[in-house]
Image (cartoon, coloured by chain):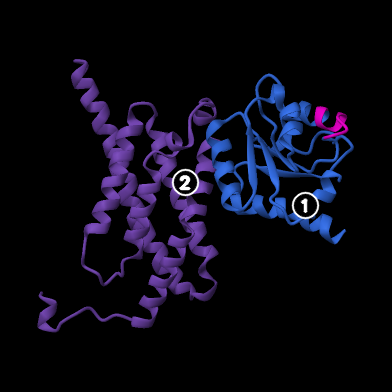
């Protein structure tokens, strides 16, 4: 259906604007989200065992992935452009692929889940002026984006190890 | 001027970060710098006390779980030195149970931050030292 035909989804405009405004506030909070995520991940035993690991190696693709995720979350549900979601999936894929060489799958999944936790913290931290239903709507969108991110990162990890097994002639 | 009195001055506070894990040290450095402090990273607990004294630090963030010499030992040394005895210290640890189960040495004020902590709460803790001194 072409929007030019005059048929568009019925949107609650004020609620959508509030959702977009709240999403913008979360984007403004992204430095804190990333810092708290880094602190959480750095204290995992696998990273504590690497005391020389620099901050940019710890974070790797997370700053870009966070940007892409917040962009995807910020998009109005009535927006039909799939690009932000695809971008978030691509960044998660890139991160999973790089981590696959050195870290087990549970680390990759923990990283994505920890990021979701920090973004969710930020949503509720900034939610004072929004109604609970708007926060829930944003939270649902967050689940959708993070489900994709987790699946993309995990798939990339598996792809790397499958390619490695084929390369070493270890494939079943 | 005593370390505590210096906290109430409007100048940029020098914060020593005693932390063996490079990523956390760098992260805290960036966060503190963005918040307007002058952070100094000290990565070896073996030389921490002399480096803290030399840096002119006014507040110390001290990791407890460090190799060779842990944070408790560094704290004892800090409190034994006249120059550093009264410095406010934030003890940080990823192992919550090990915090607060040890008698604290006499000296400047001490706060605890259990890793992973919210970086904004850390800033609040540091500011709390300054407020405490200003309000007496």
The chain assigned the colour blue in the figure is B
Residue A172 visible in rendering = no
Question: Of A35 and A133, which appears nearest the observer?
Answer: A35
Residue at image position (61%, 47%) is B32
Question: Of A141 and B27, which appears nearest the observer?
Answer: B27
Residue at image position (38%, 71%) is A20
- CA neighbours of label 2 inside 10 A, class few (<14), some (14 to 19), many (20+): some
- Name the spot of residue B74 as percent of width and height, x first: 76, 28
> Is residue B16 left or right of A126 when viewed as pictured?
right
Host chain of mark 1: B
Residue at the far bottom in the pictured view: A6
Mark 1 = which residue?
Answer: B129
Residue B79 is covered by the magenta coloring: yes
Residue A42 is covered by the magenta coloring: no
Which label is found at residue B111? none
Palette colour of chain A: purple
| Above or below A148: residue B54 | above
- For marks 2 and 1, give the one nearer the viewer: 1
Asked where in the image residue B60 lies, by quadrant, the reply is: top right
Query: Do the residues at pointers 2 and 1 share their chain?
Result: no
- Name the spot of residue A159 as percent of width and height, x first: 24, 32
Question: Of A151 and B46, which appears nearest the observer?
Answer: B46
Q: Secondary structure at mark 1?
A: helix
- Name the spot of residue A51 as percent of width and height, x first: 54, 27
Mark 2 = which residue?
Answer: A114
Region of the chain picked out in magenta, as a range: B77-83
Host chain of mark 2: A
> Is residue B46 left or right of A64 when viewed as pictured?
right
Residue at image position (44%, 48%) is A115
């Amino acid at each position: 259906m072409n929007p030019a035909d005059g048929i568009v989804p019925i949107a609650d405009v004020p609620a959508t604007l509030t959702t977009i405004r709240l999403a913008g506030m979360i984007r403004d909070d992204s430095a804190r989200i990333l810092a708290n995520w880094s602190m959480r991940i750095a204290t995992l035993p696998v990273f504590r065992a690497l005391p020389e690991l620099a901050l940019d190696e710890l974070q790797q693709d997370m700053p870009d992935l966070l940007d892409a995720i917040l962009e995807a979350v910020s998009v109005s549900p009535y927006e039909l452009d799939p690009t932000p979601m695809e971008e978030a999936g691509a960044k998660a894929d890139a991160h999973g692929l790089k981590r696959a060489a050195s870290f087990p799958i549970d680390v990759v999944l923990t990283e994505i889940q920890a990021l979701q936790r920090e973004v969710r913290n930020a949503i509720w931290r900034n939610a004072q002026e929004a109604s609970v239903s708007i926060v829930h709507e944003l939270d649902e969108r967050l689940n959708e984006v993070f489900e994709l991110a987790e699946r993309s990162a995990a798939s990339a990890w598996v792809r790397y190890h499958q390619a490695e097994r084929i390369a070493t002639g270890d494939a079943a | 001027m005593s370390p505590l009195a210096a906290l109430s001055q409007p100048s940029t506070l020098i914060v020593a970060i005693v932390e063996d894990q490079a990523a956390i040290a760098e992260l805290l450095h960036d966060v503190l710098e963005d918040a307007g402090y002058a952070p100094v990273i000290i990565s070896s607990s073996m030389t921490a006390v002399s480096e803290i004294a030399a840096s002119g630090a006014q507040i110390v963030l001290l990791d407890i779980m460090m190799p060779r010499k842990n944070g408790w030992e560094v704290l004892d040394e800090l409190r034994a030195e006249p120059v550093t005895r009264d410095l406010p210290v934030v003890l940080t640890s990823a192992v919550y149970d090990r915090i607060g189960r040890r008698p604290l040495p006499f000296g400047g004020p001490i706060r605890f931050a259990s890793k992973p902590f919210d970086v904004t709460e850390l800033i609040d803790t540091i500011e709390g030292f300054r407020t405490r001194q200003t309000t007496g």
